[in-house]
Image (cartoon, grey):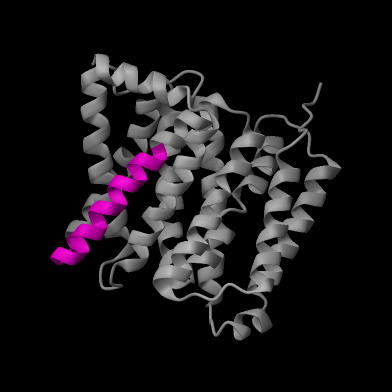
Amino acid sequence: MIYIEELEKKLNSLNKFNLVFASFFFSLMTLCVKNIDKRIPIYELVFFRSLLSLMITLFIINLKNINPLGNNRPLLILRGVLGTLALICIFYAIRNMPLSISTVVQYTYPIFISIFAGIFINEKITRNLVFALIIGWIGILVILNPAQLSNINVEIKNISIVVAFLGSICTALAYVTVKKLSFTEDVYVIIEYFPLVSFITLLPIVLINWVTPNWNEIVWIFGIGLFTQLGQTFLTIGLKNLPASEASTINYLQVLFGSIWGILFFSEIININFLLGALFVLLGTIISTTKIIKKT
């Protein structure tokens, strides 16, 4: 118990580095997903990830003697539902798109966060946000236009692109709920509801359509659970201690990490168009998450 509290104090003192670590561990999670054979269904990967994460989180909650049910249960459940949908979409995109491209599309979520902040928490949608949306979409079009994909010998189905953006939208909504919950809930209770909801909702589907993983796949599946748990912990602590503008920009490091893994492990081609498009998306992220003015 004492060691857990001392560790939490050290993690809180890391400030921005919490989000750097989160981006790194999430990128390792995507690497694990990409390495698993397609015969294992996406929902089964999310289920195993949730099971491992839930076991670790409940163990910590028990050590700290925290009420696992939390205070704002409806919002906690909503966070779990959004996180589950986001993870299924993200895993699908990783499996069906180059890792570098799927990561860039996923990281359009800060722009969506700004939009949802204007809708749900009464933050003004400024001209800066409209400008950020335009720049961000230009970046995506630069990366996903057919001529660009043809130059790097990549073919992506439209359904994969749609699912990737749906994952980004669900991620943005999940971030908004996490930020709101961080004022009233313990970090580990927020983390707990994500895998708890995933486990409960996916269990019957997995049992009906069970596919037994081999030992090699089990290693990668364990990596998914471990790295997602580490990433989620560092992310939740980082969001609690930093403004959204700083958090979103630092989180974009996952694009760098994902691109590196794509080049090293999957021989993906990173050309000037990809770099330009990624830069536009990053610029849109920075603009959309700075100088947000609240309505009076």
Specify the quadrant that holds the N terminus. top left
Asked if one can make out residue 250 in the rendered structure from this viewpoint, the answer is: yes
Q: Quadrant for residue 249, please give it.
A: top right
Asked if one can make out residue 213 in the rendered structure from this viewpoint, the answer is: no
For the image shown, how many numbered marks are present on the structure?
0
Image point 14% across, 64% down: which residue?
A: 215
Name the spot of residue 230 as percent of width and height, x first: 35, 40
What residue occupies the far right of the structure in this picture? 127
Image point 48% across, 22% down: which residue?
A: 13
Q: Is residue 167 above or below residue 213?
A: above
In this image, 250 relative to 230: left or right?
A: right
Magenta stretch holds residue 60? no
Magenta stretch holds residue 222? yes
Viewer-side residue, 117 vs 16: 16
Specify the quadrant that holds the C terminus. top right
Question: What are the residue bounds of the magenta stretch?
Answer: 208-232
Q: Quadrant for residue 293, please give it.
A: top right
Name the spot of residue 164 as percent of width and height, x first: 52, 62
Image point 28% across, 72% down: which residue?
A: 37
Name the spot of residue 12 as percent of width and height, x first: 46, 23
Helix, strand or loop: magenta stretch: helix
